[in-house]
Image: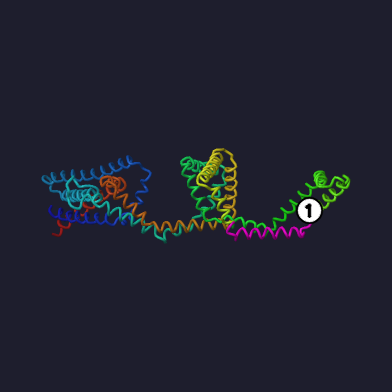
Amino acid sequence: MGWYFCVHACRIITMIIEIKNFIINFNSLTTNGFITKFSKFENMNDEAKRKQLRKYKAFATGLFVLMAVIFIVTTILQKSNNSHWIGYVRAFAEAAMVGALADWFAVTALFRHPLGLPIPHTNLIENSKQRLGDNLGNFVVGNFLSPQNIRPYIQKLKVSNFVGEWLAKEKSQEILIKNLSDIVLDILNKLDDSTVSQFISKKVSEMTDDIKLNKVVGNGIGYILEKNDHQRIITNLSKQIKEYIIENDEMIQERVKKGSYSFIPSFVDNKIADKIADGLSDFFKEIEEDPQHEVRALITQKIHEFSVDLKEDPKWDEEFKTIKNGLLKNDKLDEYSNDIWVSIKKTLMKELQEEHSALKNYLSKNLNEFAQNLKTDENLQNKIDHWVRVTAYKYILKNTHQFGNLISTTVGNWQGKELSEKLELEVGKDLQFIRVNGTLVGGLVGLIIYTIAHFFI
């Protein structure tokens, strides 16, 4: 009987070493079926898995008990019966028991200490959980997130059509606009008005400190002259003056009489007044109707000289500084900034809260246009899809180590007992077949050894 135990002692040692390597090289575990097996049970809850595990444990244990009963019965029978077949059956049952115990020890050692005894190289998962997490993380990164693996999937990404179809739906637009409105409203409500006003005031003060208002005004006048827009002003003024003279000819007559001598008859004064009025109105009519009138050229020249003087004469710099400082004193600037912010905030909140406000209608219109462009404009589709692919590809490759660290840290942070239980629920059923196979193979090997020893030794 000793040779049976020698054989199976060697089997126990070999199996423990194999299981240890099995845990250290977790990628082998994954490649050989962990992920596949897990996928078969992913839709089962933990309670169902426990029932299934108990069922297969009971089956493997029952087979061991059956072998033990057969061994006991055959041992008793051998004392009173010399039939050869009893020896063969007894040898099979004896070796099967040893095989069952050896494989029970090996499977149990994977998840806990057999019989609670702290035997070396047992409770392997709990003792090796950090290495398990590291190896699993390295496996996922190396085999799933490598450039050659993710590139085919990234190249298939085509989000533009999906986004276009989604945005084209009225319900989607309502959801998007509502969520954006809620976010902006939340931000507006949380902002401190005085802080925002002070920020605006500070930025306006910083911007105006370096602004030379005289040069701004001078350049503005120069721009008007360059575009010849001042001619419309001259035309309009000439027309207004001409009409004023015509409509107020009586006032001109009164002015002429007032400055005339008493001995001059009134009809003479009236005649002189009419001549003056007619001459002035004709003069301004000429200016109004003639784009090349000399008065226009003279006015243009004087305006140009004034714009140059504004930019170059230091006195104007000082004048505008005084005006600016008077308008933008700290208290006034704070007041202006507060008014600006309150007005902007009030308008925004009103627009965002109303169901069909101008702002929301504008957003909806632009979303519709963008959605149609996404569905019909191939150039736009290609640009967006290319940007998404490149960005996703770079981001994934840049952060692959983070995925590995996440897996490693998650597994490492699990309680050892919890991790053992999780893995046993997933693969424990299959490991019970190791016990069953160990029982049957052990019995067959024992039977073969018994046969050889009986006939040839």
Kind of residue indicated by mark 1: Phe
In the image, 341 versus 223, the foreground residue is: 223
| Image position, residue 286 (x, y; %) | 80, 55
| Image position, residue 380 (x, y; %) | 56, 56
Q: Is residue 102 magenta?
A: no
The main secondary structure of the magenta stretch is helix
Query: Position of 219 compared to 433: left or right?
Result: right
Task: Count how many numbered circles sit on residues in the image.
Answer: 1
Query: Position of 150 compared to 361: left or right?
Result: left
| Image position, residue 117 (x, y; %) | 17, 47
- Magenta residues span 286-315
Asked if residue 65 is positioned above or below residue 14 in the image, the reply reads: above
Q: Which residue in the structure is indicated by mark 1?
A: 284
Query: Position of 17 compared to 264: left or right?
Result: left
Task: Evaluate whether residue 175 shows in this view.
Answer: no
Q: Residue at x 12, y 53 (%)?
A: 2
Under circle 1, the secondary element is helix
Q: Residue at x 59, y 53 (%)?
A: 376
